[in-house]
Image (cartoon, rainbow, N blue to C red):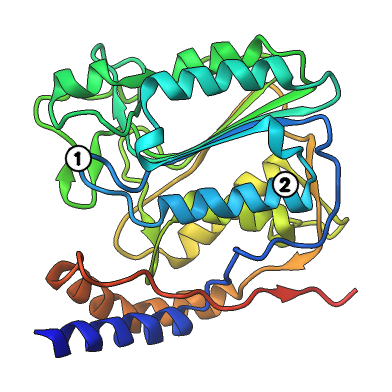
Amino acid sequence: MRLFRVLASCFLFVASLAAGWPDLSSPPPEAGGGEEDAAVIVGIEDYVFVDDVLGARANAEDWYRYLTRTRRVPPGRIVLLRDHEGTDAQIRQAVHRAVSMVESKGTLWFLYIGHGAPAKDGKDGLLVGADAQQSAVGIYSRSVARSEIVALLAEGKQANAVMMLDSCFSGKTAGGSLAPDLQPLVPTYAIAATKGVTVFTGAASDQFAGPLPGVRRPAYSYLLLGALRGWGDKNGDGQVTAREASDYAKEALLATLRDRIQEPQLEGAETDFVLANATEAGPDLIELALGKTASAPLIEEIQVSAPEESSPPELAPAEEKML
């Protein structure tokens, strides 16, 4: 059994190298622009009662490094909630704090990586708290409504507010349903555009927001961060707009996913404002698409057989564009 675990880890590592997804833990050089920003980052990998979200904590930490070291957001204006810290009460408290600290020319960031679920009436989405029990009542009582966060963000004096939700609101997980008896989400559900708040969501209302192909990392938050590093600069002007970032994540998922349909959503009255000045080259999506077919069966088989013992694979180094 021990030999199997060692071999499984080796296979995962080799498959991850073949997949070619760059490691984002080393942020790009300082670019600035975030000196007046404030942020809340929530990454819940280890849920107390419901299925874990593998890689959520690491993605959240990569976002933290990017905002502080590259964008130069003051660390005192960022609240990072990981695993058990991500309760509904602490999320609300963190948002209130960030709203009070952001400055008039800054951007207010709310980044959530974890489970989502449909609200009781099926007309809203819930951000599931770390200690929510695996029942409809438990989730309804220990989660935060998406509309509540949007309303709080709109109260700030910032120039722009960005809400990124790497979650889905269908109540689905990799293993099936998040909890029994959840009210289905109304298929046409969408929050009306709120002035100054741009919302990035990892999947459509009836879809599952899952991991990158071949790597146990939530796909959407990883790809959006990559987009802001320069991968999403479609027109080559050295700037990445909200629309470009969203389009890049959608294109990357369409190109590389084979086991599900995941279509990210972008909502907001304004989507053409600049989110980053960056020139980093992204991974080769064509090669990633070609490599997915060979590595997927092995990854799926290992994850099902021994998910509790295998460690997440390392990621390949990022590349820089030639200036």
Mark 1 burial class by Cα count in 10 Å: few <14, some 14-19, many 20+: many
Spatial CA distance of label 2 from label 1 is: 31 Å
Q: Position of residue 251 (x, y in %)?
A: 55, 57
> Callout 2: helix, strand or loop?
helix
Kindly identify the residue that appears in the image at 40 percent across and 37 percent down. Answer: 204
Task: Tell me which corner region of the image, top left, top right, bottom left or bottom right, holds residue 137.
Answer: top left
> Callout 1: helix, strand or loop?
loop
Q: Nearer the viewer, residue 121 or 2?
A: 2
The nearer-to-camera label among 2 and 1 is: 2
Kindly identify the residue that appears in the image at 53 percent across and 60 percent down. Answer: 252
Q: Nearer the viewer, residue 307 or 271?
A: 307
Give the side of residue 317 with respect to residue 303, left or right.
Answer: right
Tell me if residue 316 comes above or below residue 131 in the rendering: below
Residue farthest along the right direction in this orientation: 323
Residue farthest along the front direction in this orientation: 76
* Residue 79 is at least partly visible in this image: yes
Q: Which residue is mark 2?
A: 68
* Amino acid at the residue labelled 2: Thr
Tell me if residue 138 comes above or below residue 173 in the rendering: above
Exactly how many numbered labels are in the figure?
A: 2
Kindly identify the residue that appears in the image at 36 percent across and 32 percent down. Answer: 205
Tell me if residue 161 comes above or below residue 35 in the rendering: above
Q: Which mark is residue 50?
A: 1
Q: Position of residue 229 (x, y in %)?
A: 72, 58
* Amino acid at the residue labelled 1: Val
